[in-house]
Amino acid sequence: MQVALAALLLASFGCRKEQFEQLSPTVEPTESFRQIEAPADFSWNTARTVQVQFTGRLADPRRLTLKISGEDGAVLYRKLQAAGEDAVLSVEVPAFTRQLTVQYGSFLQTYPATGNGVSVKLN
Amino acid sequence: MKNMKSAFLLFFTLILNTLSLSAQTLALDCESGNRSVEQANCWVFGAVSYSSTASQVITGTWSARSNSMSNPSAGASWIKTPWFKPGEGNITFKTKLENSGGTSGGSNYKAVRVRVIPYDPNASYGEGLVLADSFQYTFVAPYTSAVDVSWAVPAAIANSGNPYKLIISFLGVGGNNRANFDNLVIPGTYWADPSNNCLPMPNVQDADDDGVSDPDDDYPADPYRAFNNWFPANGLGVLMFEDLWPNVGDYDLNDLVVDYRFNTVTDAENEVVEIKYTFIIRAVGASRRNAFAFQIDDLDPEHIIGVSGAQAAGAPWLLLAANGTEADQEHANIIVRDDVKEGFSLVSAGNLVNVNYNDPALEKDTVWVTLVFKNNGQPGVAGALEFDEISPSDFNPYLIVGQDRGKEVHLANYEPTDRMNVEYLGEGQDASDAAQNRYFTTLNNLPWALNIYNATPNLTETTDFTQGFLKFSEWAQSGGLLFADWFLDEPGYRNTEVLINR
């Protein structure tokens, strides 16, 4: 019984390791550019576009500067935005960006930007 | 004469209407049907509800309804506005009673009282002591017919620049009656901050009165400009090209190396005023006399009023439109340099520039190009360009090979321009397939150009790119999952012996 349990545990570790390997591909560096085998859909972009969905607050009459900054504080996007209106913004960021900070008046919030979309709703 | 008078009156009325439409106001019409909407924007209701009962509605579908007005206290049933900065003019509203109860006999009365609350940062909720200036409307017959009530904004607070609230109280003595209330309009500017406990927004200056406060305005004295939008956000990016396309070369990607940064200047309307480009042609590891240009994908060139700063003149293939963009192009194209070697002194056709440590360093060639989209607030013939209609990903730079205008080298999967000789596509190692929107890659998806979000150094002549940037191949082979920051100067990322940036 104990042997069977141990075998079961070992097998589950193996499965988890395989899943981890699938999530984190390992590749060997090449000795030349020509040897690179890039996926067919790889775009070679060092920047990417993040869609920021700004949901306005009904009947809020304010019109303030909407500012989006990267992790290093660099301003990526600015516009004058009506608080009562929705907006969809496309922000170009370095490909390795993990979070964006959105500021609107006194509203300040940081969002993960690991996917392709950020949803902002004013408090 | 009669016609002239009519025309004048019509014109005068139109002007008045325009002025009233353009003046800022704070308003409450209850049409949300839900006090929570107004409360979220800092209105406060004390024993006042919204009603859609036909007999209780003054205009529209909903009106406000007070509690029973049998208490002479102004604190029994009331509406409190958000903080606002009063303008000048009249505070107006419509009101009526639901019946005539408590309106006659002895001391009975029903009234609406309006009082002013100044901002006091030391007081609870910032509400200072009510000012002496106040107004009271006492209902008269016919009580159940709506009346228009008007009260001039007190001179002491009009245009003072300070924030105030109004408290509108429903009070009375005797009987059991309620008021209906609607269409409150207050001259002034909303000045509350729902994200900060409904306190007043901070006082800010707006010297050019464009609606963008000076601390946020990159052009505080220019009403036609507001924001700088830089790309890259910090520092320079760099473009690197191979010019042997459609054949592969030595993959040192230094046949043309251009640092760049551009600034999209927008106004308070969020429209593009100008785009200012800085191109620093840093290195030319090619014997050919190539040109450098860029297209803004999907941009009608008619949006551009003018182009300045481009250093392109004399090439026999150069054909410019009146606004300085390249002619015969559906999308906007700018020829930055029709011969990139002309920007360097003492360079002959076969000489390479800044790719070998053994060669003398030559001063880099900086070209500043400005595209103008609005002049003093006025756009070009194609109309204004909204900031959200254009993106840094629309920047489509390319090399023109050896003075052959039809031979362009673009970034992977960026479309060639209308002046491209498409017969070249698919030749040599090029595996372009327009039907698949694939351009300027080999069968193995290798590019002939890179756009790097950082002004990295370039490779020395004939040195393979992967020898200088040690994580580059892993980044590419992992589809971008690994070492997305391969171009940064992190430990183990570079072999500096084969990298150069003079």
Image (spheres, helix red, strand yellow):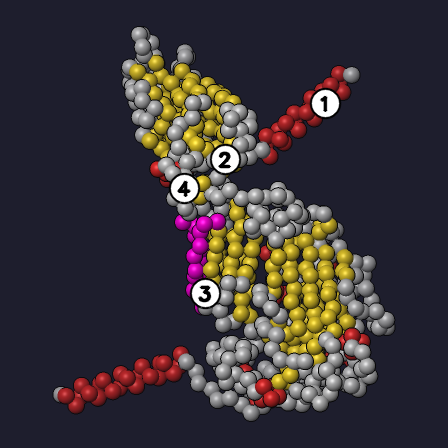
User: Which residue carries the number 3 mark?
Assistant: A99
B311 in magenta: no
Disc 3 versus disc 4: distance between alpha carbons?
28 Å
**Which class describes the residues within 10 Å of circle 1: few (<14), some (14-19), or many (20+)?**
few
The front one of A59 and B52 is A59
Q: Amino acid at mark 1?
A: Phe
Given this view, does label 1 or label 3 mark the residue nearer the observer?
3
The front one of B95 and B458 is B458
Q: Amino acid at mark 3?
A: Gln
Asked which secondary structure carries label 2, the reply is loop
Q: Which residues are magenta?
A: A105-123
Asked which secondary structure carries label 1, the reply is helix
| Quarter occupied by residue B364 | bottom right
Asked which secondary structure carries label 3, the reply is strand
- N-terminal of the pair, mark 2 or mark 4, is 2
A109 in magenta: yes
| Dot label at residue B8 | 1
- Residue B367 appears anywhere in the view: yes
Given this view, does label 3 or label 4 mark the residue nearer the observer?
4
Q: Are marks 1 and 2 on the same chain?
A: yes
